[in-house]
Amino acid sequence: MDWLEALQRLRSTDQPGVLATVTGVRGHAPREAGAKMLIAASESWDSIGGGNLEATVIDRARVMLDGGSTVPESLTFTLNERAPTQHGKQCCGGVVEVLLEPFLPRPTVAVFGVGHVGHELARILSRLPVHLHLVDSRADQVDPSRLADVLGGVADVHPVHTPVPDSVLGTLPAGAHVLIMTHDHAEDFLLCDAALRRGDLGSVGLIGSSAKWSRFRSRLQAEGHTGTVIERISCPIGLPDISGKAPAVIAISVAARLLQLLPDTVPSVEKGGRS
């Protein structure tokens, strides 16, 4: 299996990895600029030259994986007998630069309520590399024909119709980002309560005014949630500097705020080949 096939496999199974690319070579080196390898927690695919260079890159990549890093790093190796090494000498005589680009599993985003705003938001999010759950207690809102403009994007979309949406919330993976915007305030409240009882979600947003949030906050306190826990919910949602009540405007604002919370999950080779 080559690095590209391995990358696709890691992405399909939601495993993190680091893509290592030789970005520059001066003098003699084991591999040319553009050579790539992929490193996962316990495996690696392809080669950027072997020896100390490759072993050190693998070590550093796994440190990045252990720390959940999303920031690319560049390493420079001098290949002569005087250069300090950890895994033996390489005496090719050249200098090699290697770029390490980490990528994380696709994040999970769940939109509860696929009405006017929820549908517009789903259209935007479907263009991002995420697992997108669209949950509604009304069957027609998640009918495939209605979501035709959502299902064709790069997102892995999961439309769900259920009369008990809060039961779906309990099945989401830890770190999932939840957006609550149903047609029913009672349903919204049950979802808020369920989200706070999870305690391990990435973020929770509730659509609505400050007056709605004031009422919800009081009711959540009556349910036994402390003030610190309740503040895990953001309401109103979106970027405060973007005003307007049109569904598309709200959706853009919410998506922009969500992008600030999501890690950079995709190496640049999948973003138009900028590596």
Image: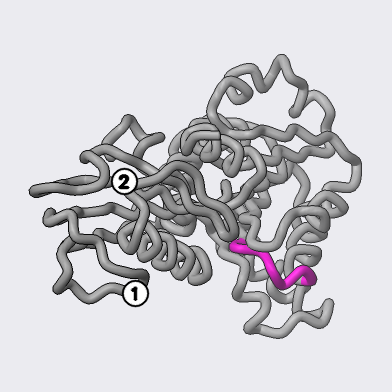
- On the question of residue 113 being in view, the answer is yes
**Looking at the rendered structure, which numbered label has been put on residue 164?**
none
Looking at the rendered image, the quarter that the C terminus falls into is: top left
Residue 104 falls left or right of residue 14? left
Tag 2 or tag 1, which sits nearer the N-term?
A: 2
Looking at the rendered image, the quarter that the N terminus falls into is: top right
Q: Are marks 1 and 2 in contact (CB under 8 Å)?
A: no
Residue in the image at 60% along x and 25% along y: 150
Residue 75 falls left or right of residue 24? right
**Looking at the rendered structure, which numbered label has been put on residue 86?**
1
Secondary element at tag 2: strand
Secondary element at tag 1: loop
Label 1 – label 2 distance at C-alpha = 20 Å
* Residue located beneath label 2 in the image: 21
Which of labels 1 and 2 is toward the front? 1
Q: Residue furthest left?
A: 27
Residue 21 falls left or right of residue 195? left
Residue in the image at 64% along x and 70% along y: 214
Asked if the stretch drawn in magenta spans residue 12, the answer is no
Residue in the image at 28% along x and 73% along y: 85
Residue closer to the observer: 105 or 188: 105
Q: Residues within 10 Å of mark 2 (few under 14, many from 20)?
A: many
The image position of residue 241, as x and y in percent, is 34, 55
Q: Amino acid at mark 1?
A: Gln
Q: Residues within 10 Å of mark 1 (few under 14, many from 20)?
A: few
Residue closer to the observer: 39 or 252: 39
What is the number of callouts on the image?
2
Q: Residue 78's quadrant in the figure?
A: bottom left
- The stretch of residues the image draws in magenta is 197-203
Residue 24 falls left or right of residue 18? left
Q: Amino acid at mark 2?
A: Thr
